[in-house]
Image: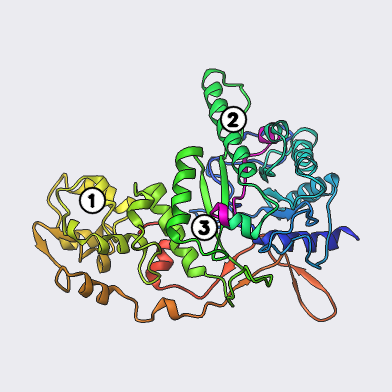
Amino acid sequence: MDLQQKLEILSGAAKYDVSCSSSGSKRSSKSGSLGSVSSAGICHSFTPDGRCISLLKVLLTNYCIYDCVYCANKRSNDIPRAAFSVDEVVDLTINFYRRNYIEGLFLSSAVFKSPNHTMEMITSVIKKLRVEKGFAGYIHVKAIPGASQELIDQAGLFADRMSVNIELPSDSSLKLLAPDKKKEDIFKPMKQISTNITTALSEHKRYKKAPLYVPGGQSTQLIIGATPDSDLNILGLSQKLYDKYSLKRVYYSAYIPVNQDNNLPAIKNPPTLREHRLYQGDWLLRMYGFRAEELLNEKNPDFDINFDPKTNWALNNLHLFPIEINLVPFETLLRIPGIGVRSAKKIISARRIAPLNYLDLKKLGVVLKRAQYFITCNTKYYGAVDIDEDKIRTVLKPKLDLNEIDNPYEQLNLFDKLSSDDKFQFTSLSTLTLSKQFLVEDNITSLTGEL
C-alpha cells in the first residue's frame, strides 16, 4: 500500500476524534528550527482574527485490538486497514509544513498490538520531529490508556498538548460498549499528566531553563448519545475533571451511528443540537462560574434544546430575578441571560460614571431580546411580558421547535471524490461537523461563547 492510500484511510479514520484544538502553548523556536507556536496557540478552527489554522490530523494506525461497539475502527469491522511507520508520519509532517498546508500535528491511534507498543511509536514520532528534525510547531498527541508511566512521561516532554479520551461518561456504559477497556486505565494517565504539569510549572518558576511538560495542557472527549447517560451525568463528570485534573477542555462529540448493535441507540442522525447545548453548558462552567449541579438536577437532568443553558437556568430560578443592573457585582451580572463576559465588564466600567438606562445597555452589547425579562434599570422593568415563567418561555421559545428539526450531518474527509474514476482532490486538513443552522443568536454564541 502506497503512502497516498494510507493517508486517505488514516486521515478519514481520524475524523471521529474532535478533541484537537489548542491554546496557550508557548514552545519557542530556535535558529534553524521549523515552525513556531504563538501564545494564542494553533486551533483546529478559526482564530479571533479570522485565520483558519490547520493541523495534520491522522491516526498512526486503525488496526485495533479492542472491539468497542460504537467505534468505526473496532476489531471485528471489515474496513480498509493501514498503518504508518514512524518515518512516514515524520516525513508527512515536515513536507506538509514546508508546503504551508499545516501548522502542526494531531496524532492519535487505535491500539495496535498493545498499549505500550502504540505509545512507544507515538513517542518515537514526536521525539524524532523535535530532536532530529528541529520541528518547533504545535504537536498534540493521545496518551494511550494502559501504557507505561515512563512512555507517557517521555511523550509529555515533546508534546504541546496531550489528551486521554474517556469517550463513555459512566462505568456502566464502558462495561456495556467497551468491555476491553478499564476505567482505571483511563484515569491513571490523566492524573499522571496533571501531576507532571503541576510539577513542571513549579520547577519552571524556580529555574527558567527547566523543561516544559505539555504546556498546552490536557483535554478529553466524551461521546454524546451512544448511551442513556443524561446531560447531568455528562456535565457532572466534566465538572469533576476540571476540578480534579485541571483540564483545559472537555470536548463533546455527537454519536455517529457507524455500527449496528442491540446495545446502540437506533438513531438516524447524530444529536448535534444536544452536543451544542453541552458545549454552552461547559462554557458556563469554565468562564461564568456556574457549577454543574446549578444548571441541571435530578428533576431536570437534560438541557432544554429550545433554550440556551443560562436562559434555561434563569427560567428555573425566576425567584432570583429581576436584577438591578446598576447595583449587582460582576459575578451576578454574568448570570443574567444576554450578558456575556465582555458586556459585563463594560457595564461595571460605565456605571461608575453614571447609572445605566435601557438604551445604554444596547450600546454596550447586551442581548436585550433575552436580558429584558431578567433585569431592571433604575428600578424600571422593560420586559414585554410580566415576570412569569410560562409567559417568558412562550416569548423566548423559537418559532420552530428545535426538538423537531431533522439535522443533516456530514463530515468532510481529507480527500473528497471528484468523479467515478477514483481521482481525489486535496480539500481540507480540517474535519468539520456540519449541521443545520441554529437560530441567529445561537450562531453568535457558538462563535463568541457568550450567553
Q: Which of the 4 image quarters holds residue 39? A: top right
Q: Mark 2 or mark 1: which comes first in sequence?
A: 2
Q: Mark 1 or mark 3: which comes first in sequence?
A: 3
Q: Mark 3 or mark 2: which comes first in sequence?
A: 3
Kind of residue sitting beneath label 2:
Asn
Q: Is residue 448 visible?
A: no
- Name the residue that disc number 2 marks: 196
> Does residue 340 lie above or below 212 as drawn?
below
Q: Residue furthest right?
A: 1
* In this view, the mark in front (3 or 2): 2
Residue at disc 1, secondary structure: helix
Q: CA distance from mark 2 to mark 1?
A: 40 Å
Give the residue displayed 70% in from the left and 55% down from the top.
Answer: 57
- Name the residue that disc number 3 marks: 50
Residue 201 is inside the magenta segment: no
Kind of residue sitting beneath label 1:
Ile
Q: Position of residue 155 (x, y in %)?
A: 70, 36
Q: Of 352 and 269, which appears nearest the observer? A: 269
- Name the residue that disc number 1 marks: 347
- Which region is colored magenta? 155-172
